[in-house]
Image: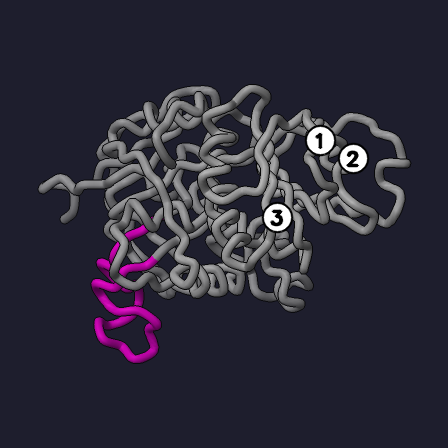
Amino acid sequence: MRAMMLDKPKSGLILRDTPTPKPAAGQVLLRVGACAVCRTDLHIVDGELSAPKLPLILGHQIVGRIEKIGGRAVGDEASPFRIGDRVGVPWLGWTDGNCIYCRSGRENLCDNAKFTGYTIDGGYAEYAVADARFCFPLPDGKNDTEVAPLLCAGLIGFRAYRKIGNAHRLGIYGFGNAATLITQVALFERREVYAFTRPGDAATQKAARSLGCAWAGDSDEAPPEKLDAAIIFASVGPLVPAALKNIVKGGIVVCGGIHMSDIPAFSYDDLWGERTITSVANLTRQDGEEFLRLAPQVPVKTKVQEFPLEQANEALAAFRSGKTTGTPVLKVIQADFSHG
């Protein structure tokens, strides 16, 4: 099969022909249809997440169809899936199921967890193996490239969103893929959304207002009203004290990324009044099930820019620069000789 491989951080991906993986018991082999690009992929390439398996196939927003079921006969009633089923594979790829976190409904914090496209090979390839327990069934309807961004920007964004509880007036800092998807959910649930972008980013502010945001402005501006909660999707530490200044007493600031630059010192007065700062780590399967049930009701719409598999480096560069017409998604077309 063809795969885009990362040999070492701070280097480009290399297109290689590599053996098609074989699924073990409990795993499925997927023929990849699409894999969306995520900022976490950039953190891995840039060496900001320091423990990837190497060499590595990136990609944790995989949409594909089941080609083989490991250790089971086709049609085995014990299997949750069948050959040809369309499934999605998220960031959380495996947990031990036995630790204190897994046994208390917090599998996202499992110390032994494995992650798709980081410690497990991911979807920048024609085929991928995944643990069947961590695959989500996907109905037919939207094409693969449209669905792919829901599997990280959507799922982890949704976990961050649920952290705000019943907050009505929500500020979102960093108005990219996750923010665009979660804003649609927030508006569906009749909340007010205030969008904060890079200073001077008039185009993104216009897009946020057209989506239905009550206000859009620069990240160093104060909103016209105090916020009940804020979610920070940008990996910019100084936004934390900025958001604290803009929330009401008892409000919450949720840091929605896996990596963030250092948070500068701030006055305790900005935290006082029972304000809260929290992070979001990974996701649980329950998050995925809830979001994928809700998304069609909204309905959550994605905007994507397709790249062929062999242009994964160009897709990453476009994501880094912000010069895209939508979420970069690798559309994977299998070569005739790729599987045998």
Question: Is 183 in front, or is 234?
Answer: 183
Q: Secondary structure at mark 2?
A: helix
Q: Is residue 155 magenta?
A: no
Which numbered disc, 1 or 3, marks the residue closer to the eye?
1
Q: Residues within 10 Å of mark 1 (few under 14, many from 20)?
A: some
- At x 27%, y 77%, the residue is 76
Mark 1 or 2 closer to N-term?
Answer: 1
Mark 2 or 3 closer to N-term?
Answer: 2
What number is the disc on residue 16? none
Measured in 3D between alpha carbons, the distance from the residue under mark 1 to the one under mark 3, in whole angstroms, is 28 Å
Q: Residues within 10 Å of mark 2 (few under 14, many from 20)?
A: some
Q: Is residue 71 magenta?
A: yes
Which numbered disc, 1 or 2, marks the residue closer to the eye?
1
Residue annotated with mark 3: 281
Q: Secondary structure at mark 3?
A: loop
Q: Secondary structure at mark 1?
A: loop
Residue annotated with mark 1: 222
Q: Is residue 91 above or below residue 296?
A: above
User: Is there a contact, CB below 8 Å, between mark 1 and mark 2?
Assistant: yes
The colour scheme of the drawn protein is one colour
Q: In this image, 333 relative to 184: left or right?
A: left
Mark 1 or 3 closer to N-term?
Answer: 1
Q: Residues within 10 Å of mark 3 (few under 14, many from 20)?
A: some
Q: Amino acid at mark 2?
A: Lys
Outermost bottom residue? 77
The magenta stretch spans which residues? 62-87
Residue 218: quadrant of the picture: top right
